[in-house]
Amino acid sequence: MKIREVADIVQGVVLSADDMLDHEVEFAFASDLMSDVLTIPTEKLVLITGLSNIQTVRTAEMADVQCVVVVRNKKVTNEMVELANENHIVIIECSSSMFKTSGLLYQNGIKPIY
């Protein structure tokens, strides 16, 4: 699934790296614990999180995550957007809960990591 489709499915707003919207993602992982993100395979991964701070983007950068969906209507900072753009990481803001967002993506073919 293309990242632009992820944004459409979750009715989200793309805030960064719109040059990456045609990249493919296949898996999703939902967590607010960035230490957990560092322990999983992250190829073609969407990270779903309610954590809206610079550590989220730094973790995505370290783990080679291409797309982060920030849920629960949390607002992303300008610093996060700048760092995400520098590292070609798509950030999508979404008003739904983590559970609903995960369910929508699963229902549309995104696979869980495990």
Image: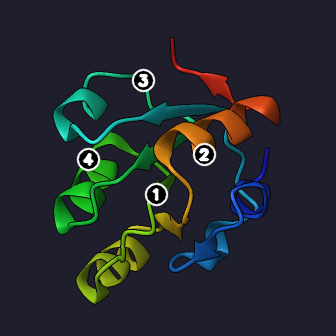
CB-based contact (under 8 Å), mark 2 and mark 4:
no
Q: Amino acid at mark 3?
A: Pro
Q: Is residue 78 left or right of residue 49?
A: left
Q: Earlier in the sequence, mark 2 or mark 4?
A: 4
Secondary-structure class at tag 3: loop
Name the residue: 60% across, 45% down.
Answer: 101
Label 4: how many Cα within 10 Å (few below 14, some 14–19, many 20+)? few
Position of residue 47 relative to residue 23, above or below, is above
| Residue pointed to by mark 3 | 41
- Tell me residue 57's x, y (percent): 29, 61
Q: Name the residue tied to disc 2.
A: 101
Mark closest to the chain's N terminus, 2 or 1: 1
- Which amino acid does the dot numbered 1 rest on? Val
The numbered mark, 2 or 3, whose residue comes first in the sequence reads 3
Q: Which residue is mark 4?
A: 62
* 24 vs 11: above or below: above
Residue type at the position of mark 4:
Met
Nearest-to-viewer mark from 4 and 1: 1
Judge whether residue 13 can be spotted in this image. yes
Q: Is residue 65 above or below residue 40?
A: below
Separation (CA) of disc 4 from disc 1: 21 Å
Marked residue nearer the N-terminal end (4 or 3)? 3
| Residue that badge 1 annotates | 71
Indicate the position of residue 42 as horizontal and vertical percent values.
45, 32
Give the distance between the C-alpha atoms of the residues marked 2 and 3, in whole angstroms: 20 Å
Query: In the picture provided, is 67 more to the left or to the right than 37?
Result: right
Q: Residues within 10 Å of mark 1 (few under 14, many from 20)?
A: many
Q: Secondary structure at mark 1?
A: loop
Rendered view: 102 above or below 41: below
- Measure how far apart labels 1 and 3 are at the Cα level: 22 Å
Q: In the rendered structure, are the residues bearing label 2 and label 1 in contact, judged by CB atoms less than 8 Å apart?
A: yes
> What secondary structure is found at the residue carrying circle 4?
helix
